[in-house]
Image (cartoon, grey):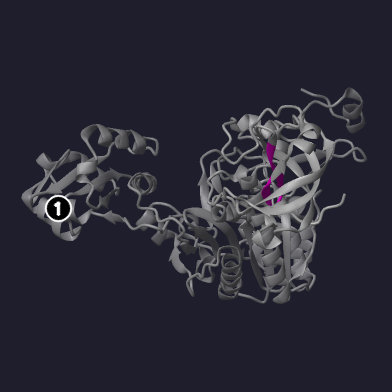
Amino acid sequence: MERTHHNGNLRLSNVNEKVTLVGWVAKRRNLGSLVFMDLRDRSGIVQLVFDEKIAQEVKDVRNEYVLQVKGTVLERKDKNPKLATGDIEVKVEEVKIVNSSLTTPIIVADDTDALEDTRLKYRYLDLRRSVLQKNLMLRHKICMIARNYLSDEGFIEVETPILCKSTPEGARDYLVPSRMFNGKFYALPQSPQIYKQLLMIAGMEKYFQIARCFRDEDLRADRQPEFTQIDIEMSFVDEEDVFAVVENLMKKIFKGVKDVDLEEHFVRLTYNECMAKYGSDKPDLRFDMPIQNINEIFANTTFKIFANVLGEDGQINCLVVKNAADKYSRKDLDKLQEFVKVYKASALAYIKYANNEISGSIAKVMSEQEKQDMISKLNLESNDLVLIVAAKAQISLTSLGALRVKLGRELGLVQKDVYKFLWVTNFPMFEYSEEENRYVAAHHPFTSPNPEDVDKLLTDKANCYSRAYDLVLNGYELLSGSIRIHDQKLQEKVFEAIGMTLEEAKEKFGFFLEAFKYGTPPHGGVGIGLERLTMILADTENIRDVVAFPKTASAYDLMSEAPNVVDEKQLNELGIKIK
């Protein structure tokens, strides 16, 4: 269909030009004998003017009708500075109604009042809103920058299978029944992990893929059952090589998308340092307020609760909230106490420092020496608030870590338009699963242990650390990766450490272990969460805002009504009976 310009691109420089435009009617206004309409396409909107000679032809036109118009660009008398095309309008001389529209169930505008479920049911209408179109264009731009950069660096884009073998030691698989092999199943890939390692064994050396991944997990604001990652793998590398490629990629993306220059090198902390300082392995570094250990201050305390915690090898940790004592009433502090209980902390103690005096919930049980130590060692200033959790180390740290994030947002400490990257390194090799009553791989079973910890694989799993790493951005885990195991004997030892016999390993990963016998190079890589990266750059906290056709929090597609039942004939062909 003929079109000479995109609607949102017209400017004063186009005045007196004859133009042909197409698009959807975004708004209609009748002013006497004149009719005004806003015509929207992907580039934006432009105001159309229909005089009395032609107004009759559009008397029935309403919002979301599709029009083609021909006319002349004129300078507007009443300019609209809020609109990119606000200096001009198009006087329509010919109009064609290409298609009509029912009254839409949602308002197609950035400021829509529709509930999210309604927006998801009519997602094709929701996607007409410019805010969502901009998010998808942003996602496209990120992908193009990544593709061009990685290609220039010698990486080869390779597609890996979507139908693959179900493997354990990860999230729940989505299974696909096979018609040709009744009773057997494919799985959708949780990631291309095994295939990208096989590509390294195949001698590709540098691989990438913008890969679809599937995990049957409980969802949340930053997770979908199907998602995309910028997947990267390299041979003959160590951590420094991987970090350099990723940091340069992020610099390209942020410069190209936001015109932001990132810091030369990203901050690095080990997992243990991260937990001790922030109570989280994905801390938001856009504001200060680290967790501080105050065991020493209360080493000789007569306060039984604190003494008991220290006697059981627990920890007393605190947050110093600067200049906030007068911002939190007793009622507010009670709410904070309920908040930390969600993280299994039994109580939240507090003290306030003002006028050279300490007051608060534990002030009466503190000695003068303890009070003075608190003031000097925590560098307290007037109107500071100290929040304390005494408990087992994990509970004390994670509860205060979550509280730190909550306070940062409540007090407006989080800086907007600031991007703070952090490499978290030296993750534990294993984590104990209460459900399975055994140690499982913390990352995945192909992650290499630190060389100095290889001897701990079978004897000291709790203190065995790996060559796994995460990149964190503004409190979100942006990528996970690791240096992989490339030695067959070491790989077998790791399987043994997670309670998998050699026979079980061969049954699950036989083809993979077989490949290890034929000269496997050292290799490592990452998987970058495309949706999370786009979400941060689009300044939204809802991952559904950067996915074209997302699922709900219960993994349901309201638009297509999937998942749904299938007919008996299909089930019979697959040899499946619904239980």
Query: Count the marks: how many?
Result: 1
Q: Nearer the viewer, residue 42 or 403?
A: 42
Please report the residue visible at 69 percent of the width from the left and 33 percent of the height from the top.
33
Image position, residue 564 (x, y; %): 77, 28
For mark 1, what is the residue?
Answer: 382
Q: Nearer the viewer, residue 98 or 274?
A: 98
Q: Which of the image's four quarters has the C terminus?
A: top right
With respect to residue 558, does 446 lie above or below? Answer: below
Residue 524 inside the magenta-drawn segment: no
Q: Is residue 221 left or right of residue 417?
A: right
Instruction: Describe the element under mark 1 as helix, strand or loop.
Output: loop
Looking at the rendered structure, the kind of residue marked 1 is Ser
Image position, residue 304 (x, y; %): 17, 39
Quarter-of-image position of residue 241: bottom right
Residue 43 inside the magenta-drawn segment: yes
Using the rendered image of the protein, determine whether residue 537 is visible from the camera's viewpoint: yes
Q: Nearer the viewer, residue 560 or 23?
A: 23
Please report the residue visible at 28 percent of the width from the left and 44 percent of the height from the top.
389
Assess disc 1: are there few (<14), some (14-19) or many (≥20) residues with their C-alpha within 10 Å of its C-alpha. some
Image position, residue 196 (x, y; %): 73, 63
With respect to residue 157, does 337 lie above or below? Answer: above
With respect to residue 363, does 273 lie above or below? Answer: below
Q: Is residue 304 left or right of residue 131?
A: left
Segment colored magenta: 35-47
Image position, residue 496 (x, y; %): 62, 55
Magenta segment, principal secondary structure? strand
Using the rendered image of the protein, determine whether residue 501 is visible from the camera's viewpoint: no
Q: Is residue 307 left or right of residue 539?
A: left
